[in-house]
Structure formats: structure tokens, C-alpha cells
Amino acid sequence: MFKKMVATNRSYRRFYCEENIAKETLLSLVDYARLSASGANRQPLRYIVSCEKQVNEAIYPTLGWAGYFADWSGPEEGERPSAYIIILQDKDNKMVGGVDHGIAAQSILLGAVEIGLGGCIIGNIKREELSEVLNISGQYEILLAIAIGKPKEVVIINEINAGDDVKYWRDENQIHHVPKLKLPDIVLNYKD
């Protein structure tokens, strides 16, 4: 069951925008992040949630959507996420080891998968613009944005060999393919 959840937790970039997500749902996803591990239990992360159409429309242009798709600027109107969770760091309470936001983002997205949603972790952010849009205090640094919604696209994992191209791609039917190395190629002592 857990392996299926992890495999289903892909980077979805197109959504059914008419599927609204309640603020309470977003808060429950952030609660998973709150309960997750934190280096030295410092708990430096803070969050902003948005499920309001007007705010989402202002957030959207501050995000970069798919680095390998140079000719694609992101989901079209009607395929944009219904919600966002912005992950921030309190500048007076820096992370230990710099991994808390990754752990938090994964917890949020696994929680989303569990309830039939999906999302995309976005690090390509126009941070100054997003800070202005959301009126974020200078006390906080934007780390990640997570787009959340009901996935509209099919994402397939393709096993590849070491040395093969790892770039994700879409086929002629707009099915999104994600190449993943085989387990023996990533575990250095696999045959021991």
C-alpha cells in the first residue's frame, strides 16, 4: 500500500481546476508536515495556504513549472491548481541540515495522494514577487511552493538503466513519463 502511494505521488502539473479544495484540507496537510521530523526539533518552517481563486491567480505567475519543457510555460487556464501551500523558513530559526522542507513537502504530498489529490513541489520561484503578492514579512524566507489539486494528467514511471537519459517527457497523448533508475543501479552494495 505505501509503495503504491509513493509511486502515485508524482509531480502533477495539470489539474481539474473546478475541483475546489477547502482550507481545512490544506490545514490537515500542513499538520502532517508539522508532525514530521525536524533537525534538532528546531521546527523552523512556517506555511501559507491558499485556496482562493484570486490569490491563486496572483501566485501562479511567480512560479516556474517544468524545467525540461522549455516551450511550456505551465498549465493553461482551466488546468491550474486549486490550491497552494507555500513553505517558509523563519530567518531567526534556521534549519539544521537543510532538509526539513523536503521532509515536510513529501509528507504534505503523501497526505494529498491519500485523499485523491496530487501536487507539484516547485523551487523555481520569483521570490520577491511572491513575497509581495502574499505580503510576507522579511522575517521569512520562501523555500518551496506546492501546487495542489485533483490531477488531470497521467504520469507513468519508466525504469531505465544507469547512463540513460533521466529527463521526464510527454508522449503524443500528453502522458507524462518519468524515468527512474533500477534499484540495483542506486544501491552500491546491492549484490553483497
Image (cartoon, rainbow, N blue to C red):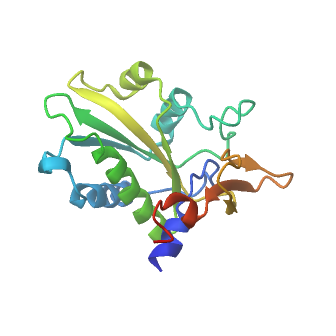
In this view, the residue in front, 169 or 47, is: 169
- Residue lying at the far front of the rendered structure: 192
Query: In this rendering, would 33 be left or right of 41?
Result: right
In this view, the residue in front, 153 or 55, is: 153
Q: Tell me where residue 19 sits by quadrant.
A: bottom right
Q: Position of residue 9 (x, y in %)?
A: 52, 61
Q: Is residue 53 above or below residue 159?
A: above
Q: Residue at x 13, y 29 (%)?
A: 92
Q: Tell me where residue 176 sits by quadrant.
A: bottom right
Q: Is residue 58 above or below residue 1?
A: above
Q: Residue at x 67, y 37 (%)?
A: 68
Q: Is residue 22 visible?
A: no
Q: Is residue 97 above or below residue 28?
A: above
Q: Residue at x 73, y 47 (%)?
A: 169
Q: Position of residue 141 (x, y in %)?
A: 29, 28
Looking at the rendered image, the quarter that the C terminus falls into is bottom left
Q: Position of residue 136 (x, y in %)?
A: 29, 27
Query: In this rendering, would 55 be left or right of 19?
Result: left
- Residue lying at the far right of the rendered structure: 172
Q: Position of residue 30 (x, y in %)?
A: 31, 54
Q: Is residue 7 visible?
A: yes
